[in-house]
Image: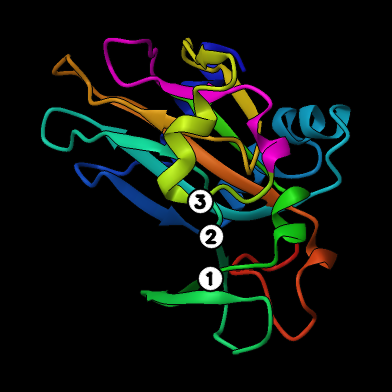
Amino acid sequence: MSPGEARAFAQHCDAGEIPGIRLDLTTELARYLGPASVISRQAVRLGVDATPVRIVAFNKSSSANWSVPWHQDRVIAVADQIEMPGYSNWVEKGPVWHCEPPIGVLHNMVFIRVHFDGCDETNGAIEIALGSHRKGFVDARQAKDVAEMHEIEVCRANPGDVLIVKALTLHRSSSSLLAVSRRALRVDYARRSDLDPRLSWSIPAG
């Protein structure tokens, strides 16, 4: 995206001083994430037959600075809790339930990261272990060792850059060394039909 588009987009994704906040797919956000958007067209170009199912805005700053070790994101957001085989580790966060789905759901998911500020090693750029998604489920206790078996890429970015990553990719992020904001938007894309029909994604189909 152009820096101007990124600035306009960021106005609808303000996390304030909160480290992360879940967003609904509003009319304004749909302009940037809907089927005709630059982001969705890029996903389709890469062979991703999916739509947004979770949106989270992040702002790493001097008042909200954190690091996360090597890990996989294996949690999805759904409208209601329904206990069933293959879906586990249920947690309610506000009006939304989160759980870990069967591995097949995660295999077909990607997360798309839109950068609203520049980032590199100095302010907590995300690092990914290239190709690690092919390992499938990785136990958290083995995540560091498995990640270090792969080539590591620091995802340096300029405002407007968009990163598309397979959901099961091992990744980590360091704390920022600078007293500046590092804003980003994460959008999980999934094939809606992969979810058990008794469940509903937290973001309704557009």
On the image, the x and y values in percent for residue 104 come to 77, 59
Specify the amino acid type for callout 3. Answer: Asp
For the residue labelled by badge 1, is the local secondary structure a helix, a strand or a loop?
Answer: strand
Q: Which mark is residue 75?
A: 2
Pick the residue in front: 159 or 169: 169
Q: Quadrant of the C terminus?
A: bottom right
Between the residue at mark 2 and the residue at mark 1, the CA separation in whole angstroms equals 5 Å
Q: Quadrant of the N terminus?
A: top right
For the residue labelled by badge 3, is the local secondary structure a helix, a strand or a loop?
Answer: loop
Q: Earlier in the sequence, mark 2 or mark 3?
A: 2
Q: Which residue is mark 3?
A: 139
On the image, the x and y values in percent for residue 18 come to 23, 47
**Is residue 173 found left or right of 27 in the rendered image?**
left
For the residue labelled by badge 2, is the local secondary structure a helix, a strand or a loop?
Answer: loop
| Residues at circles 2 and 1 in contact by the CB criterion of under 8 Å | yes
Question: Is residue 53 depicted above or below 123 in this figure?
Answer: below
Look at 32% across and 37% down and name the residue there: 68
Q: Residues within 10 Å of mark 1 (few under 14, many from 20)?
A: some
| Residues at circles 3 and 1 in contact by the CB criterion of under 8 Å | no
**Is residue 41 found left or right of 30 in the rendered image?**
right
Specify the amino acid type for callout 1. Answer: Cys
Write down the region rendered in magenta: 117-135
Q: Which mark is residue 99?
A: 1
On the image, the x and y values in percent for residue 53 come to 64, 57
